[in-house]
Image: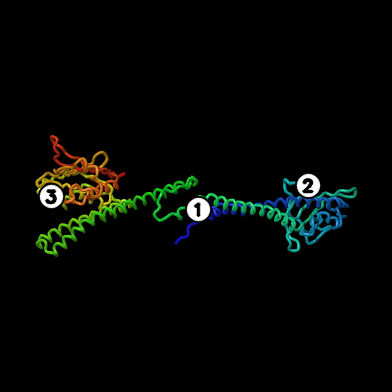
């Protein structure tokens, strides 16, 4: 079974994952920017060191014959060492590369001065290595002039990179822990907000868990967040449907037990009477058979009524031409029609509806059975099925006695038969439940002629299933 996702975990991941990715990207960018800023700051220090050395130079001779002399000892550079983390190297050379003073292991510069230098000096900056150690080098072309000569010196000052990298890392760490602290605050806020927002849900869950199994009353959650109202309303609606279903089942069981008790009691009495020999065996068996047939018909109709409620909970249905199905049902009951020698007429036109096939068959069969049962021998029976007013209209007209005004008020109720000796009173109740499940209408109307009832018309209207 797949474990349900936690709302708290989902929010934490959804919020902190993008923030964490941003922190990583920002940290890489911040380190590069910090390193660039430190490089710029310490490059200025290197340039200042180079200028200081350049100011200590002396020359004799002119141009190519000039001889440079450096008057600055290495101790003069100690003032530019920020701490013991870095080391400084310098080299003073002629333009030809010949070293005048400094560290010979510092390679001579072979580059060129930028056309637009960042400083007001002939200076260039580049990276190199000294003793397999990375260094940053500032190169200054320093003109040297005295009363004894004139020349051009190349002053190189190099510094190892530990201090720059340490400064960049310090800036990164100082910023990073603040960002991590911010993420921790966000995580705590998310947890607290989720805890507070789901408090009504937990309270509602506890109330539902404390309910008895039979308590399907509506959910009372006035403090539920607006986002949860659709869920609460939907749950209340489902519980309402369950309550109606349970009420229907209880009513059905109660009525069924009451109705079955009578034929079973009659059957028991008939069997006891037959065993005592109160009547001839053939007559006793005939009465027992009639009682069994009535009980069987009652049981079948009760099962049909229960099946209607079951199918009502299953919205799946198919497109069916009601006219074709009505013709099939008429053929099935044709022996009953012939037995009463009825003048049968069937008028139909294609009438597609969306329904469960069993529901439509049961509806049509019950209406025809009722009409045949109440029609006099040789009477007229008319069945008409045609599209009308956006729906399919089935009309079943018999020549029976009709229904009284008192019976009309309760005819669709279960076990409300007009003649208890001829039926169980469930046929029309089944029809009504099927019609309601299919979102249709049903009506029973007497037909009169000169103030006399000449028959009954059962009319059913179901919505057509027009292809979109």
Q: Where does the C terminus fall, quadrant-wise?
A: top left
Q: Nearer the viewer, mark 1 or mark 2?
A: 1
x and y percentages locating residue 368 in the rendered image: 18, 48
Which quarter shows the N terminus? bottom left
Q: Which residue, given by chain and number where applicable, does mark 2 sit on?
A: 121
Tell me the distance, in whole angstroms, between the alpha carbons under discs 1 and 2.
74 Å
Q: Earlier in the sequence, mark 1 or mark 2?
A: 2
Question: Is residue 299 visible to us here?
Answer: no
Label 2 Cα neighbours within 10 Å, binned few <14 / some 14-19 / many ≥20: few
On the picture, is 35 further left or further right than 54? left
- Residue depicted at 23% across the width and 41% down the height: 387
**In this rendering, does residue 24 appear at all?**
yes
Q: Nearer the viewer, residue 187 or 29?
A: 187
Question: In the rendered image, which residue does mark 3 sit on?
Answer: 337
Q: Is residue 233 left or right of residue 250?
A: right
User: Circle 2 sits in a helix, a strand or a loop, which is it?
Assistant: loop
Instruction: Mark 3 vs mark 1: give the one in front.
Output: 1
> Going by the picture, which residue comes out furthest to the top?
450
Question: Which residue: 73% across, 63% down?
Answer: 132
Nearer to us in this view, 21 or 281: 281
Can you tell which mark lies on residue 202?
1
CA separation in Å, label 3 and label 1: 64 Å
Residue 320, given in percent of the width and then of the height, sits at 25, 49
Q: Residue at x 26, y 51 (%)?
A: 359
Q: Pinpoint residue 384: horizontal percent, then vertical percent.
A: 18, 43
| On screen, residue 406 above or below 14 | above
Q: Are marks 3 and 1 in contact (CB under 8 Å)?
A: no
Of the image marks 2 and 3, the number of the one nearer the N terminus: 2
């Amino acid at each position: 079974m797949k474990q349900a996702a936690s709302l708290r975990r989902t929010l934490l991941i959804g919020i902190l994952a993008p923030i964490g990715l941003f922190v990583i990207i920002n940290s890489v960018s911040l380190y590069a920017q910090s390193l660039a800023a430190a490089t710029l700051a310490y490059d200025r220090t290197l340039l200042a060191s180079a200028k200081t050395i350049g100011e200590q130079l002396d020359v004799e001779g002119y141009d190519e014959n000039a001889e440079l002399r450096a008057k600055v000892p290495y101790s003069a550079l100690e003032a530019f060492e920020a701490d013991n983390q870095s080391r400084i190297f310098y080299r003073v050379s002629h333009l030809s590369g010949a070293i005048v003073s400094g560290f010979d292991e510092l390679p001579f510069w072979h580059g060129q001065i930028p056309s637009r230098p960042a400083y007001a000096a002939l200076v260039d900056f580049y990276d190199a290595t000294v003793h397999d150690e990375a260094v940053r080098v500032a190169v200054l072309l320093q003109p040297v002039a005295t009363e004894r000569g004139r020349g051009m010196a190349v002053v190189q000052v190099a510094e190892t990179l530990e201090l720059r990298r340490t400064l960049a890392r310090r800036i990164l760490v100082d910023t990073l822990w603040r960002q991590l602290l911010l993420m921790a605050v966000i995580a705590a806020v998310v947890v607290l907000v989720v805890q507070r927002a789901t408090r009504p849900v937990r309270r509602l869950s506890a109330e539902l868990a404390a309910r008895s199994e039979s308590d399907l009353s509506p959910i009372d959650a006035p403090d539920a967040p607006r986002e949860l109202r659709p869920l609460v309303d939907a749950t209340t609606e489902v519980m309402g449907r369950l309550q109606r279903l349970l009420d229907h089942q209880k009513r059905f069981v109660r009525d069924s037990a009451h109705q079955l008790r009578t034929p079973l009691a009659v059957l028991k009495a008939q069997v006891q009477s037959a065993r005592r020999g109160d009547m001839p065996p053939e007559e006793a068996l005939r009465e027992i058979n009639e009682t069994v047939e009535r009980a069987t018909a009652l049981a079948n109709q009760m099962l049909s009524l229960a099946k209607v409620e079951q199918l009502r909970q299953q919205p799946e249905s198919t497109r069916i031409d009601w006219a074709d199905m009505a013709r099939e049902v008429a053929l099935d009951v044709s022996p009953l029609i012939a037995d009463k020698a009825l003048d049968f007429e069937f008028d139909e036109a294609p009438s597609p509806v969306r329904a469960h096939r069993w529901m439509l068959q049961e509806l049509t069969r019950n209406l025809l059975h009722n009409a045949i049962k109440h029609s006099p021998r040789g009477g007229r029976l008319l069945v008409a099925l045609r599209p009308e007013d956006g729906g399919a209209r089935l009309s079943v007209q018999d020549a029976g006695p009709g229904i009284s005004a008192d019976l009309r008020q309760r005819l669709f109720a279960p076990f409300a038969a007009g003649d208890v000796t001829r039926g169980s009173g469930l046929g029309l109740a089944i029809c009504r439940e099927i019609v309601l499940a299919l979102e249709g209408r049903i009506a029973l109307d007497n037909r009169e002629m000169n103030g006399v009832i000449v028959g009954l018309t059962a009319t059913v209207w179901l919505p057509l299933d027009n292809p979109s």
